[in-house]
C-alpha cells in the first residue's frame, strides 16, 4: 500500500484538499507516526490520505487579544506554549511536562486535541478554562468548547472537511490555582492521572471554582454542577463542603478508567487544594 500524501503551501490550499479528498492533517506526527509504525526505520503506512500541514504559517503563533483572551495557532508546539507568558499558567505547565524535549518541539496543540487521547496533556487545562477550538472549512468557520469538541477516547466533532486552525482561551482571573501530573517517572512520562483546579475569592466570597481531571475516563472529567456547590459560599464554608465536593468529583470519573489508588490519589489532590485554600492568605499557585 502506498501513502497518498499531500503537502499544501497555504491554508486555502489545505482546506480545498481536505474538502475534496478528506485527507487527514498531520503536523508533528507524534501520535499518528507511532500509531501506524511498522518497525524501526520503516516508514509508516496510513490507511487514509495524509496531508502534511507543518509548513502552514497561518496556523502558527500565539496572540493576545484586546479582551484578554489568548489565541494559539493549531501548529504551535508544546515547547512554544510552555515558554509564552501570555498563555495561562495551567496550559503552560501542562505543555512543559509533555514528554521529552524532542517531543515538545514537534507536538502541536492542534494535534493533541485532534488525537483526543484521554491521557493527552493539553485538553485537561483547556477544558478547565472553557477554551474553544476554532474549526475551518472552505465554506464555514466555527468555534466550540474543547469539552464539546472531544466526544470520547479518540473521538471528536471534527467534520470531514474541517481543519483545526486555532484554540481560543478566554481570560480567567483566579485567586488560587493548582496543577499536578502524575506519571510512572518524573520526566518523559505519559500521564497516569492529572488534575487542575482554580478558585476565585472576592471579599471572602467564592466567585468561581473549577476542577478537571485527566486520564480519568473516555474524556476529561469535569462537573460544573459540583463546582457550583462552592460558588457563592464563604471561605470558611470550604471545610464543611469539602467531602461532598470530593465525593461528587470522584463519581464523575469513569469507574472503568482508574484503579482504586488512582481514584484515591485524585481525591487526595482535590482535598489538598481545598485545604490550602481554606487557610486563606494571599492568592497563589498551590504546589
Image (cartoon, grey):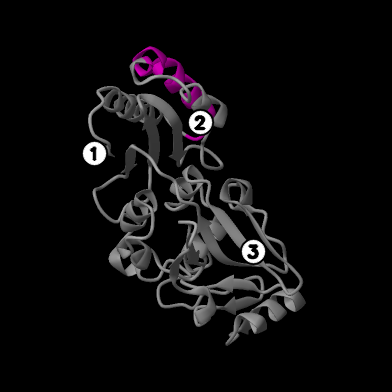
* Residue displayed at 45% across by 16% down: 244
- In the rendering, which numbered label is found on residue 253? 2
Q: CA distance from mark 3 to mark 1?
A: 35 Å
Residue topped by disc 3: 135
Crowding near the residue tagged with mark 2, few <14, some 14–19, many ≥20 C-alpha atoms within 10 Å: many
Mark 1, residues whose alpha carbon is within 10 Å: few (<14), some, or many (≥20)? few
Q: Position of residue 226 (x, y in %)?
A: 52, 25
Residue bounds of the magenta highlight:
237-257
**Sequence-wise first label, 2 or 1:** 2
Mark 3 or mark 2: whose residue is earlier in sequence? 3
- List the single residue furthest toward the top: 240
Exactly how many numbered labels are in the figure? 3
Q: Secondary structure at mark 3?
A: strand
Please name the residue that numbered disc 1 is placed on.
Answer: 287
Instruction: Find out whether the residues at labels 3 and 1 contact each other: C-beta distance under 8 Å.
Output: no
What is the CA distance from the residue labelled 3 to the residue labelled 2?
A: 28 Å
Determine if residue 4 is in view. no
Amino acid at each position: 500500500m502506498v501513502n497518498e500524501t499531500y503537502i499544501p503551501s497555504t491554508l486555502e490550499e489545505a482546506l480545498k484538499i481536505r474538502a475534496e479528498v478528506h485527507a487527514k492533517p498531520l503536523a508533528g506526527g507524534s501520535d499518528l507516526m507511532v500509531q501506524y509504525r511498522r518497525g524501526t526505520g520503516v516508514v509508516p503506512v496510513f490507511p487514509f490520505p495524509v496531508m502534511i500541514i507543518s509548513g502552514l504559517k497561518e496556523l502558527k503563533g500565539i496572540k493576545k487579544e484586546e479582551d484578554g483572551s489568548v489565541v494559539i495557532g493549531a501548529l504551535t508546539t508544546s515547547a512554544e506554549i510552555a515558554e509564552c507568558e501570555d498563555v495561562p499558567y495551567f496550559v503552560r505547565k501542562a505543555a512543559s511536562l509533555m514528554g521529552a524535549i524532542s517531543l515538545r518541539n514537534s507536538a502541536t496543540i492542534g494535534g493533541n486535541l485532534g488525537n483526543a487521547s484521554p491521557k493527552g496533556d493539553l485538553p485537561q487545562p483547556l477544558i478547565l478554562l472553557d477554551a474553544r477550538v476554532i474549526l475551518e472549512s472552505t465554506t464555514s468557520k466555527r468555534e466550540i468548547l474543547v469539552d464539546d469538541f472531544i466526544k470520547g477516547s479518540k473521538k471528536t466533532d471534527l467534520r470531514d472537511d474541517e481543519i483545526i486552525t486555532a484554540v481560543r482561551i478566554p481570560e480567567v482571573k483566579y485567586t488560587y490555582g493548582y496543577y499536578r501530573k502524575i506519571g510512572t517517572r518524573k520526566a518523559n512520562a505519559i500521564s497516569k492521572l492529572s488534575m487542575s483546579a482554580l478558585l476565585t475569592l472576592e471579599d471572602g466570597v467564592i466567585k468561581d471554582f473549577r476542577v478537571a481531571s485527566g486520564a480519568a475516563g473516555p474524556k476529561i472529567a469535569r462537573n460544573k454542577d459540583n463546582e457550583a456547590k462552592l460558588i457563592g459560599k464563604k471561605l470558611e464554608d470550604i471545610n464543611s463542603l469539602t467531602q461532598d465536593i470530593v465525593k461528587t468529583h470522584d463519581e464523575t470519573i469513569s469507574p472503568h478508567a482508574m484503579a482504586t489508588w488512582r481514584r484515591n490519589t485524585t481525591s487526595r489532590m482535590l482535598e489538598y487544594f481545598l485545604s490550602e485554600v481554606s487557610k486563606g492568605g494571599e492568592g497563589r499557585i498551590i504546589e
